[in-house]
Image: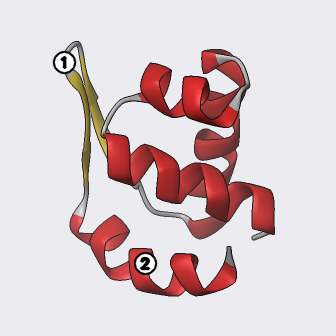
Amino acid sequence: MNQKQLQYFVTVYQTQNIKTAADRLFVSRQGVSKVIRLLEEELGQPLFVRSIKGVMPTDYATILLPHAKRGV
């Protein structure tokens, strides 16, 4: 887990929307999605439930958030 992954995770968690997070991070939506997907693979846990309306954090993501904020 690297700082970029943590920053993207925290931003997606706070906005609960991949596009909004991408806009705030000045990167593409696809780039944010890829980083989050790779982080989920690395952790072996889903971090968000995706829907048309945005993303909802999983319980695991909520537990990870304070640790991720310290790493950013």
Residue sitting at x 59%, y 87%: 70
Pointer 1 residue: 53
Residue sitting at x 41%, y 74%: 65
Above or below — where is 15 with respect to 13?
above
Please tell me whether mark 2 sits on a helix, a strand or a loop. helix
Residue 10 percent location from the top left of the image? 49, 59
Residue 52 percent location from the top left of the image? 23, 12
Kind of residue at badge 1: Lys
Work out whether residue 20 or residue 49 is closer to the camera in this orientation and state it: 20
Pointer 2 residue: 64
Please tell me whether mark 1 sits on a helix, a strand or a loop. loop
The numbered disc on residue 4 is none
Residue sitting at x 32%, y 81%: 63
> Which part of the image, by quadrant, shows the N terminus?
bottom right
Question: Can the viewer see residue 64?
Answer: yes
Horizontally, residue 20 falls left or right of residue 6, namely left
Residue sitting at x 64%, y 32%: 32
Question: Can the viewer see residue 41?
Answer: no
In the picture, residue 3 is in which quadrant?
bottom right
Check disc 1: other Cα within 10 Å, few if <14, some if 14-19, many if 20+. Answer: few
The mark tally for this picture is 2
Kind of residue at badge 2: Leu
Above or below — where is 61 with respect to 40?
below
In the picture, residue 55 is in which quadrant?
top left
Q: Earlier in the sequence, mark 2 or mark 1?
A: 1
Above or below — where is 5 with respect to 33?
below
Residue 38 percent location from the top left of the image? 69, 46
Horizontally, residue 27 falls left or right of residue 66, namely right
In the picture, residue 37 is in which quadrant?
top right
Residue 72 percent location from the top left of the image? 68, 73
Check disc 2: other Cα within 10 Å, few if <14, some if 14-19, many if 20+. Answer: some
